[in-house]
Image: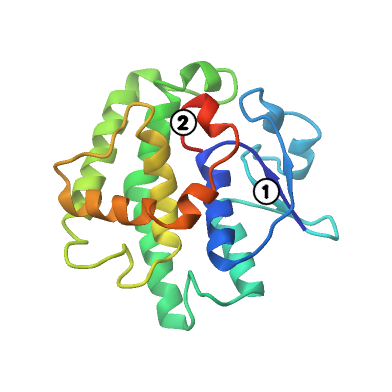
Amino acid sequence: MKLLNSFGPNPRLVRMFAIEKGIELPTEDLDLLAGDNRAAPYVSKNPGGQMPALELDDGTVIAETVAICEYLEENQPLPALIGTNALERANTRMWVRRVELNITEWMYNGFRFAEGIEIFRNRMLCLPDSAADLKKKARAGREWLDGLIGGRDFIAGDKFSLADIVLFCCMDFCKDVGQPVEDDLKNLQAWYTRVAARPSASASLHSAAAGLKMAG
């Protein structure tokens, strides 16, 4: 299998997950900024056009970051980043969904419709007038989470999990494009610093990240 890969926070999410699990994923890189992911032949494999996707040896293509991570964990259960039993897996999935619905989707669209508008205006429906409000909604989500994670090391509890990777890759990217990690959210700031210190955080950065001055 191989990861259809590019610069960006979502491909980084899968790379960071794989590194944490000790999985070596061969990669085939596409130029996200040039729009390779929105054109043939990639869209014949992933009609959604998002990056990344996981192409299996039989040609099957799995898209969507969480689905890819679930597949990797099913095939290599340990170390567990989703869970070792039904309760742990349900807890992690619950927190992943909370993070996505309350924070990351608002942050990403806030970027796409503002700082990233020149990249995305011809690729998707963009609503630039909504960008400021989307960022406010994301800020409210971060405030909500900050109030919940005091006294624990990670989002889903005491164990590092997929929920941490989902939020970290989003916040680390967005900090450079108009949505910084707020100092007044003390619990979230401490969590962010804790995750950023993990070897997988630096190892998962794309080779283009330094030149683009964005963490993806």
Residue ID for mark 2: 214
Residue 19 higher or lower than 78, as above or below:
above
Residue ID for mark 1: 53
Q: Sequence-wise, which precedes: disc 1 or disc 2?
A: 1
Return the residue found at the far bottom: 85
Mark 2 residue crowding within 10 angstroms, few (<14) / some (14–19) / many (20+): some
State left or right for residue 197 relative to residue 215: left
Residue 106 higher or lower than 27, as above or below:
above
Residue 34 vs residue 138, the one in the foreground: 34
Do residues under tags 1 and 2 come within 8 Å of each other at their CB atoms? no
Q: Residue at x 30, y 51 (%)?
A: 193
**Alpha carbon of mark 1 to alpha carbon of mark 2: how far?**
21 Å
Q: Nearer the viewer, mark 1 or mark 2?
A: 2
Element type at mark 1: strand
Q: Residue at x 79, y 57 (%)?
A: 60
Mark 1 residue crowding within 10 angstroms, few (<14) / some (14–19) / many (20+): many
State left or right for residue 172 relative to residue 188: right
Amino acid marked by disc 1: Ala
Q: Residue at x 53, y 43 (%)?
A: 205
Residue 122 vs residue 158, the one in the foreground: 158
- Residue 14: image tag: none
Amino acid marked by disc 2: Met
State left or right for residue 166 relative to residue 22: left
